[in-house]
Amino acid sequence: MSSSFYHTELSRALSEQAFGLSRFDVYGGSSPHEATASVTLLEGRTIRITLTARGYQVRMLDGDQIFESIEGLLQAVSAAYEGKRREALFSRLRSLS
């Protein structure tokens, strides 16, 4: 059975951001129109991210929030991710000079 677009896209997006995560596991949603992942942040907290046609969704204390990008979502929920992202960017820029 082939993976849905959402499963493939969520796997790809999280793989690209793996430098700023402790771990992640992507599993199919309840329909072919969504995929969900369990993501352990660098701080040790585990969150659930769901990708649908509306975007990347995470449950927050004040309700569900939807983000257009996985980067935006991770920046909103993890200060440690933002630090690692900045380090990775500076490292790439140094390698260009």
Image (tube, rainbow, N blue to C red):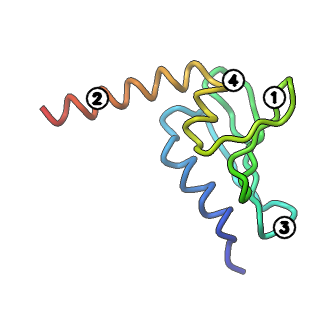
Which residue type does callout 4 highlight? Gly
Q: CA distance from mark 4 to mark 3?
A: 29 Å
For residue 48, what is the image quadrant?
A: top right
Q: Position of residue 86 (x, y in %)?
A: 40, 24
The residue singled out by tag 3 in the image is: 31
Which residue type does callout 3 highlight? Ser
Left or right of 90 on screen, residue 15: right
Q: CA distance from mark 4 to mark 1?
A: 16 Å
Pick whichever, 96 or 57, lies toward us: 57
Q: What residue do we see at 38% from left, 24% from top?
A: 87
Left or right of 95 on screen, residue 1: right
Q: Secondary structure at mark 4?
A: loop
Q: Check contact, mark 3 vs mark 2: CB within 8 A.
A: no
The residue singled out by tag 4 in the image is: 44
The residue singled out by tag 1 in the image is: 60
Residue 5, placed above or below residue 42: below
